Image (cartoon, rainbow, N blue to C red):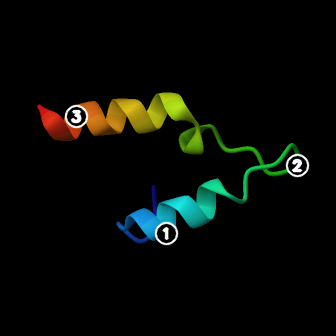
Amino acid sequence: MGGAPMLAAFLAEARKQSRQNWRDEYTAGPVINYLRQQLD
């Protein structure tokens, strides 16, 4: 996603979500898909 590969960095970006700054990659669907890929 371009950011630092750390949970804290992801959460910091996810917290920036707002109506004016909406990024689908920080919503539940992509996160769940990523986690599923890591567990396979």
Sequence-first disc among 1 and 2: 1
**Residue at the limit of the structure toward the right, as seen here:** 20
Q: Which label is found at residue 9?
A: 1
- Pointers 2 and 3 in contact (CB under 8 A)? no
Query: Which residue is at a point 67% across and 44% down the rendered structure image?
Result: 23
**Secondary element at image label 1:** helix
Q: Quadrant of residue 19?
A: top right
Q: How many marks?
A: 3
Q: Quadrant of residue 36?
A: top left
Q: CA distance from mark 2 to mark 3?
A: 30 Å
Q: With respect to residue 3, does 26 lie above or below?
A: above
Can the viewer see residue 34 in this picture? yes
Q: What amino acid does circle 1 point to?
A: Ala
Which residue occupies 55% across, 42% down? 25
How crowded pointer 1 is (Cα within 10 Å; few <14, some 14-19, many 20+) is rated as: few
In x, y percent, where is residue 9? 49, 69
The residue indicated by pointer 3 is 37
- In this rendering, position of residue 35 left or right of residue 1: left
Would you place residue 40 above or below residue 5 in this image? above
Residue 20's disc is 2
